[in-house]
Amino acid sequence: MKYFTQNWYREMQVYGFLTFPDSKEDWDESLNWKYEDGTSYIEILQAELEWRKDDLLTFLPASFHPYILDGSLKTEYPSKELRKMAEEWNENYQSRSHDLSKKYMEQFEEIKEKLPSQVLEIHTKSLHDGEVLSFSLTESTFTLIIAGTGVGWYGTNVKLTFSDVEKCLIPEQLEGSWWLYDEIYKTDTGFELHVLFDCPLSELMIQARELKIETLEK
């Protein structure tokens, strides 16, 4: 991936995590909430903070680090200083993310008329959140079966058949992973597709001449 990289996705998760209650009343109300097993709201926040600690330390400025290391980033009602720091970082992230998406779309607009029609369909009918049910690779063909019921465009499973494959880099654990984001490029002989997957976070790269997309009967 040149744009929507693994680090880009990890930072996006930090952005989604760095939110605070709108008011002290909302915070106090949340403190009374518990899971059915008795786990408290604070315990959930502590667990998620610990799980995200490495990424928080990687992508947030040093001024956030004391809050991360002592666990207070999300387990205490934020001070005005912390809230202001978060707002400024979030605004900066939003600006950078917008610029990145714009750059990718500019290059895509330049090549889309030269791409096979069904390659364009990956862009126009996103497979975001589709689970990989199975895949197979022969000498010149790569096939993916995606659970299309998890995405907005398909009501059934989807079969992607890449033919005249010139290069294919497959993650160690592809089956069971979830389609996140994709990038498409034109090559001299066809196209190049990059897909970012989650669970685990990984990347698939395929260079091929043609793509056939079929919906499968339930």
Image (tube, rainbow, N blue to C red):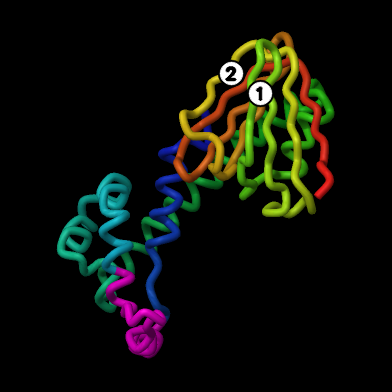
**Residue 177, placed above or below residue 109:** below
Name which of mark 1 and mark 2 comes first in the sequence.
Answer: 2
Q: Residues within 10 Å of mark 2 (few under 14, many from 20)?
A: some
What whole-number distance in Å separates the C-alpha atoms at marks 1 and 2?
14 Å
Q: Kindly indicate the quadrant of the structure image that contains residue 205.
A: top right
- Total labels drawn: 2
Residue 172 % position (x, y):
46, 29
Circle 1 SS class? strand
**Residue 102, placed above or below residue 189:** below
At x 71%, y 44%, the residue is: 126
* Residues in magenta, as a range: 23-45
Residue 106 % position (x, y):
67, 33
Which of the numbered marks, if any, corresponds to residue 214? Answer: none
At x 80%, y 50%, the residue is: 218
Instruction: Tell me if residue 138 is in the magenta stretch.
Output: no
Q: Which residue is mark 2?
A: 168
Which residue is at the front of the view, 28 or 162?
A: 162
Residue 66 % position (x, y):
16, 60
**Residue 112, placed above or below residue 141:** below
Name the kind of residue labelled 1 in the image. Tyr
Name the kind of residue labelled 2 in the image. Cys
At x 45%, y 50%, the residue is: 12
Viewer-nearest of labels 1 and 2? 2
Circle 2 SS class? strand
Residue 150 % position (x, y):
67, 54
Q: Which residue is mark 1?
A: 185
